[in-house]
Amino acid sequence: MICFYTIIYIFQIIIKMANSKFSILYVDDEKNNLLIFKDTFRRNYNIYVATSAKEGAEILKNKKIDIILSDQRMPDVSGVDFFKQTLKEYPNINRILITGYTDFKAIKSAINDAKIYQYIQKPWREDDLSATINEALKIYQLEKDNKELSEKLKLANLKLEKTNAELIKSSNKIRKEKEKADESNRLKSVFLSSLSHEIRTPINGIIGFSRFLKQEDRNFAQRVEYTDIIIRSSKKLLKIIDDIVEISRFETKQVKIKFSEFNINTFFNDLFAIYNCKNTSSSLDITISNNIPKEKCFVVSDETKLQKITSNLIENAIRYTENGFVKIVYNIEKDDLIVKNKDSGIGIAPEMQTIIFERFRQEDENMSRSFDGLGLGLAIVKENIKILNGTINVKSEKGKGSIFTFKIPIKNKAEKLDNKKSDLDILKNSQKRFKVLIAEDRKLNYILLKSFLDNSKYNVEILRATNGEKAVDIFKKSQDFDIVFMDLKMPVLSGFEATKQIKSINKNIPIIAQTAFTSFEEKARAKKAGCSHFLEKPINFDILSKILDNYLKP
């Protein structure tokens, strides 16, 4: 007994086979002709029959027909007219006209207007009609396959065009990145070449004039001149190192903001004093101006970063201005500090006014031979302004000078009257001899500091400790020191810990931290330990003089 599911399966196969056969519509008003046709071809095709054009059109709407056969002479609509009516909606289906009359006019109209595939005369023979139907279906299938293939090719072509566009885009991106990488490598090569030149120049001066100092036949004036050259060369070398370290910190995201409150007028006055002293040219005038009243001069920002920004801009202006002026104008508008750095120097070409802020870039790479510098100054300016959420722009004309304008957000404070007790209250009167403790493990550094103190205007008694533990012991035995210079990195006991212990003995003693550490973290740590001031190595003797003037007033 055949089970129910087997019957269903067989039925599904039959339907599938039926659906795989071509479908033929035959329209004829004589039913006998329809029965004969259907009986003849039903095994090979799905046969649909209609007795009128109207019935045939209805079948076309509801069934997928692959070929249409129609009798010519029908009472309502002729075969040719039926083909014409269905041509627009079903243009791809082949049509075969069957008639028992020799009607050349109808045949001509069928060929020209209804686009029939073939004309068959009644009575038809099965072999001839079968061959005609098969040929028509082959052409129909070929046209159908060709259309499908064309669509596939069209889609494939669109896909290829899209892929090609993506490849072109990717290729252009790779090319641009390669050009950028090549340009970066070229700039680095130029930078390394400039770096070698910039470093060798001050080192050559330091080594050469140091040798001259050792020669006994040099007189005092010559020795002073050589010493000045060595100092200038050392400062230049230190500036180069500082710039490289600064850029490296930005590269490794190690830069932090340290907000503090300071007097903006004092800040710019100090800058003016420094660069006016450095200016040895009688044909260059350096000025600073502002419209900030005294009661609004206290601001909150990162003073160190502001100093780097303004110093680099001023130095850049001085470097490229032989004659004329360098003018700094600053003002506060709402919550922004706006600084304009104007000069009458060589100017910058319009196409170079953007790239000069990139690292290792100068307007003309050959300028580094005419003007000192590595091309890092403006990059450092831009990075510091960026980290302070500020902006900078430049206006310049070749041969007529430049105006660099930067804006950074600040907090404005009212004028402060500091009523706190100052460290100056602990200073002794000028009649006594000032007692100084130097905690320094390096003999060379100790000799340098001692020599400066011995030759200063102050009458000093100096004691030395070679490590932090000895510094604490010396201070415990004699607590009448006026000032302590503390190296932070020493053996046995660090300067940080020694400072804490000395401050616990006498909280009013001024302790000056001296170290090669320059990071914000180390400065904060020194301040937390109790240091009153921070003196960076190599020691700037102008700053040291100011420290002594503050703490050892006569």
Image: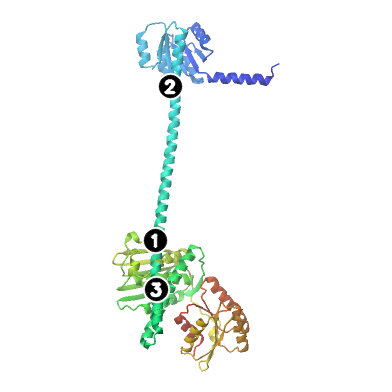
Identify the amino acid type marked 3.
Answer: Asn
Residue 266's place in the image compared with 21, above or below, is: below
Q: Residues within 10 Å of mark 2 (few under 14, many from 20)?
A: some
Asked which quadrant contains residue 501, the reply is bottom right
Secondary structure under tag 2 reads: loop
Q: Position of residue 409 (x, y in %)?
A: 46, 66
Residue annotated with mark 2: 92
Q: Position of residue 499 (x, y in %)?
A: 59, 80
Residue annotated with mark 3: 291
- Label 2 and label 1: CA atoms lie apart by 67 Å
Q: Nearer the viewer, residue 296 or 101?
A: 101
Identify the amino acid type marked 2.
Answer: Asn
**Residue 401 horizontal side relative to residue 497, left or right:** left
Secondary structure under tag 1 reads: helix
Q: Nearer the viewer, residue 75 or 219?
A: 219
Identify the amino acid type marked 1.
Answer: Leu
Q: Residue at x 62, y 19 (%)?
A: 11
Tell me, for residue 8, which label it has, or none: none
Residue annotated with mark 1: 187
Q: Position of residue 103 (x, y in %)?
A: 37, 7
Q: Position of residue 249 (x, y in %)?
A: 49, 66
- Label 1 and label 3: CA atoms lie apart by 42 Å
Nearer the observer: mark 2 or 1; the answer is 1
- Let me know if residue 213 appears in the view: yes
Furthest residue to the right? 1
Q: Nearer the viewer, residue 301 or 112?
A: 112
Asked which quadrant contains residue 123, the reply is top left
For marks 2 and 3 on the same chain, the one whose residue lies earlier in the sequence:
2
Q: Nearer the viewer, residue 200 or 146?
A: 200
Residue 442's place in the image compared with 87, above or below, is: below
